Image (tube, rainbow, N blue to C red):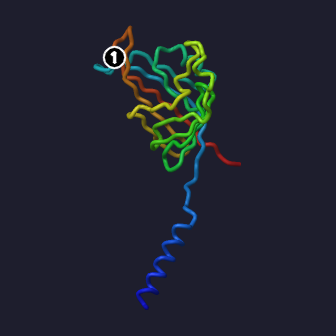
Amino acid sequence: MKLLYLFVIAASLCIASANAEPKTANVDIYSFSKATLTASRNNTKEVVFSHVFNDLASMQEFNKISYPVQPVFERAEIRDGVLIACKLWNNQSEYIVEENGTVLIPTKYNENEYNLDYNDFDPLSRPFVLSPDNNLVITGNKATFTLTVIYANRKYGTLEGKFVIELIRDELL
């Protein structure tokens, strides 16, 4: 009888703990502050070009630089040091982020995507996998994303690009 009593208590505790509300960490929201793009020769690390974008308006120059497509985080939602959602400056679209902060998935599907002209194609309109070398560091109220990519450039050969995006945590009023 005591064994049955202990079993009932253990089962009750298991059910109670399974139904308890899980503790959720706070989600911090960060907004674009500035970005820096640097490309170096892959073999010598000699800097070929560097550009600083001090605000979102200056990001228009990003489209004129010969550089692989990279997401520009206009807003980022971060929980426990992991990107969970974002809005991109590139196309003003919202994304959920999966795979521990590495896969951006658009929240809206563009039904007309296949009818677009080649020049209008948006590679960020589909799930986008960040480079395995991407890095997110949070210091105080600043989140810094470093996106690294190796790519070929007709003029310079093989380059290592570093795109660093700094965001500042939004303060609640």
Kind of residue sitting beneath label 1: Thr
| Residue 129 picture quarter | top left
The location of residue 101, given as percent across then percent down, is: 47, 41
- Front residue of this view, candidates 53 and 130: 130
Residue at x-position 55% and y-position 17%: 63
| Residue 61 picture quarter | top right
Q: Is residue 173 above or below residue 113?
A: below
Q: Is residue 43 left or right of residue 76?
A: left
The quadrant of the picture occupied by the N terminus is bottom left
Residue at x-position 56% and y-position 27%: 125
The location of residue 115, given as percent across then percent down, is: 60, 17
The location of residue 114, given as percent across then percent down, is: 57, 19
| Residue 7 picture quarter | bottom left
Q: Residues within 10 Å of mark 1 (few under 14, many from 20)?
A: some
The location of residue 93, given as percent across then percent down, is: 62, 30
Q: Residue furthest top?
A: 155
- Front residue of this view, candidates 46 and 90: 90
Count up the numbered dots.
1
Secondary structure at badge 1 equals: strand
- Front residue of this view, candidates 44 and 75: 75
Q: Residue furthest bottom?
A: 1
Residue at x-position 55% and y-position 23%: 53
Q: Is residue 92 above or below residue 140?
A: above
Name the residue tied to disc 1: 158
Residue at x-position 44% and y-position 84%: 6
Q: Residue furthest left?
A: 43
